Image: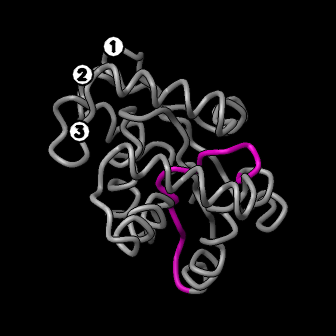
Amino acid sequence: MNVVALVGMPGSGKSEVAGVFESCGYQKIRFGDITDEEVKRRGLKLNEENERLTREELRKQQGMAAYAILNLPGIEAALKISNVVIDGLYSWEEYKYLKDKLGGRLKTVAVWAPPGLRYARLTNRPVRPLTAGQAGERDYAEIENVNKGGPIAMADYTISNCSSLDSLVEQSNNIIKVLK
């Protein structure tokens, strides 16, 4: 069984790609669910400010590999019955932690789109929308504070998400075929 970790900047299309993998039998684990659950547990509203604060606090408490560490038991349980797709591996430390624990079973797929297109998507998405300014701030925070560039640079595969949903699905399916 394989674990496919999707990496990319906000609005690149990781969740759409995760949906394609999920429709092909992969069990999806979204790293961001840890943040959402913690924000709700604290009785806070789900928004960019509270999510960022929570992500940063969890990483201060548990290190930069926090999300990989917290999700590893779920990944291992899911691997007993199916392939796994991780929606949103973020940090270099998460990548190294999972690579150490999963070895060759871990494959990474970078989903890429240029900033202007991503910001337009983020502004228009129905769940957790961001303004273009917030999207830019999040980009900088993820690159500078979360070490997000490393996993993108080390990706085994790259999907360019600049045109249609059909193209994104086709590219995703091509990777799924290679991984079988």
For the residues carrying marks 2 and 3, which lies nearer the camera in this image? 3
Q: Is residue 66 left or right of residue 167?
A: right
Label 2: element kind: helix
Asked if the stretch drawn in magenta spans residue 167, the answer is: no
Question: In what quadrant of the picture does the N terminus appear?
Answer: bottom right
Residue 88 sits inside the magenta stretch: yes
User: What's the magenta region?
Assistant: 81-94
Q: Which residue is mark 2?
A: 120
Measured as percent of width and height from the top left, residue 9 is found at 48, 32
Between 3 and 98, the one nearer to me in the picture: 98
Outermost residue on the front side: it is: 43
Answer with mark 2 or mark 3, whichever residue precedes in sequence.
Answer: 2
- Residue 85 lies, in percent from the top left, at 50, 61
* Local SS, label 1: helix
Q: Position of residue 103 (x, y in %)?
A: 81, 61
Is mark 2 in CB contact (under 8 Å) with mark 1? yes
Q: Where does label 3 land, which residue? A: 129
